[in-house]
Image (cartoon, rainbow, N blue to C red):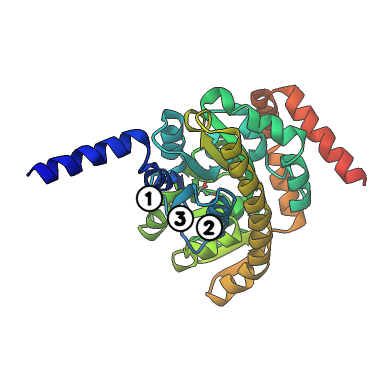
């Protein structure tokens, strides 16, 4: 018994003096970061999240670990945004459109036909206007790191091919939880129904809604072709995603840790945009092969859509502020002069 007591006392003394410290010091656990997203693991969103996670692990020497949660397993965009603001979750990627209730300036990116190309989108989103909009998140408890590409959105439905605007009349069309999308499709004659992305497939399957609108990649990776017959190429708006961090979590990080997350985010952005475009180039053919009946809205009908939605642009300009709206238009005019 005396030996055991002596051994215990010697061990306590050694710990106190740090003689055993090296083993303890090497056992410091990595900082775990929960990263939520809404599409499935095999989607462009899932692949880019893995690139981000691998890069964070590499740049931090294993001291920071991303734990990715896909398929809205941590909740919808809106629910995850609230979890980040409250500090219950550290990171997410989601639609800028679902952030409009938190930061009204995000509605700028909902403007129908704002961008004519992905290159224009990259230039504006990564330029001064995109940075200004991103910075507005800070005062709401979120830190925006980078924009990813969701892509140009197109219409699917089970009722009819949409060859002219009147074909939208009465179609129960799911839209993102966002007033611009709601107002836009009501203006175009559809019966617009806001739903979280996580509920969309079952709403289509049970015919609670007739249709939806999303980029080709999402229509393919979420298997909407299994429950949708018609696909109309409209490219009616370019949708960004944005990678965000809980400000409560971010403010507790060291400068080095913040640099790791930012550098990894930039690398994941560049990967995600290329992956999304490469996949998008093939997705339409794959959707046709899956049996979808595909038509392209004519330039004349797209022009009618733009004209009908002009009033929406006026309300967006009022909501985001004329200065920001004018700055975005000026940047686009400059890009188009080149
Ligand atoms: O995580 C998925 C969401 O970002 C979602 O907004 C994607 O475009 C989308 C939609 O239609 O909800």
Q: Spatial distance from mark 1 to mark 3, Cα to Cα?
A: 25 Å
- Would residue 142 be visible to someone looking at this image? yes
Q: Spatial distance from mark 2 to mark 1, Cα to Cα?
A: 16 Å
Residue 157 image position (x, y, % from top left): 51, 59
Query: Image check: 327 left or right of 58?
Result: right
- Name the N-terminal-most of marks 2 and 1: 2
- Disc 1 crowd, CA 10 A, few/some/many (<14, 14-19, 20+): some
Which marked residue is nearer to the observer: mark 1 or mark 3?
Answer: 1
Q: Secondary structure at mark 3?
A: loop
Contact flag, marks 3 and 2 (Cβ < 8 Å): no
Query: Image check: 113 left or right of 208?
Result: right
Query: Image check: 141 left or right of 295?
Result: left
Task: Please tell me which residue is depicted at 72% across the width and 44% down the height of the picture.
Answer: 306
- Residue bearing mark 2: 50
- Disc 3 crowd, CA 10 A, few/some/many (<14, 14-19, 20+): many
Q: Residue furthest right?
A: 338
Task: Please tell me which residue is depicted at 24% across the width and 40% down the height of the picture.
Answer: 10
- Residue bearing mark 3: 210
Q: Is residue 148 above or below residue 325?
A: below
Which label belongs to residue 253? none
- Residue bearing mark 1: 73
């Amino acid at each position: 018994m005396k030996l055991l007591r002596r051994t215990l006392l010697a061990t306590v003394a050694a710990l106190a003096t740090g003689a055993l410290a090296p083993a303890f010091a090497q056992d410091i656990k990595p900082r775990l970061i929960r990263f939520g997203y809404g599409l499935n693991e095999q989607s462009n969103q899932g692949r880019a999240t893995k690139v981000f996670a691998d890069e964070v692990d590499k740049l931090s020497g294993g001291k920071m670990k991303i734990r990715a949660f896909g398929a809205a397993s941590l909740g919808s965009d809106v629910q995850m945004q609230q979890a980040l603001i409250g500090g219950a979750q550290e990171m997410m990627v989601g639609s800028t459109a679902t952030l409009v209730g938190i930061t009204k300036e995000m509605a700028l990116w909902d403007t129908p036909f704002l961008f004519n190309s992905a290159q224009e989108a990259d230039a504006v989103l990564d330029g001064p206007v995109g940075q200004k909009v991103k910075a507005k998140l800070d005062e709401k408890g979120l830190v925006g790191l980078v924009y990813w590409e969701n892509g140009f959105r197109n219409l699917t439905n089970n009722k009819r091919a949409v060859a002219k605007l009147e074909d939208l009349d009465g179609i129960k069309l799911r839209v993102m939880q966002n007033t611009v999308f709601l107002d836009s499709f009501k203006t175009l004659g559809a019966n617009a129904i806001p739903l979280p992305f996580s509920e969309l497939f079952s709403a289509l399957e049970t015919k609670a809604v007739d249709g939806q609108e999303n980029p080709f990649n999402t229509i393919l990776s979420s298997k909407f072709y299994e429950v949708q017959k018609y696909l109309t190429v409209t490219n009616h708006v370019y949708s960004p995603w944005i990678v965000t961090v809980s400000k409560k979590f971010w403010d507790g990080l060291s400068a080095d840790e913040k640099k790791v997350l930012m550098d990894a985010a930039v690398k994941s952005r560049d990967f995600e945009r290329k992956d999304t475009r490469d996949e998008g180039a093939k997705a339409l053919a794959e959707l046709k092969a899956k049996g979808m009946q595909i038509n392209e809205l004519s330039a004349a009908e797209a022009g009618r859509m733009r004209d009908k939605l002009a009033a929406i642009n006026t309300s967006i300009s009022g909501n985001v502020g004329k200065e920001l709206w004018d700055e975005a238009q000026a940047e686009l005019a400059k890009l188009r002069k080149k």
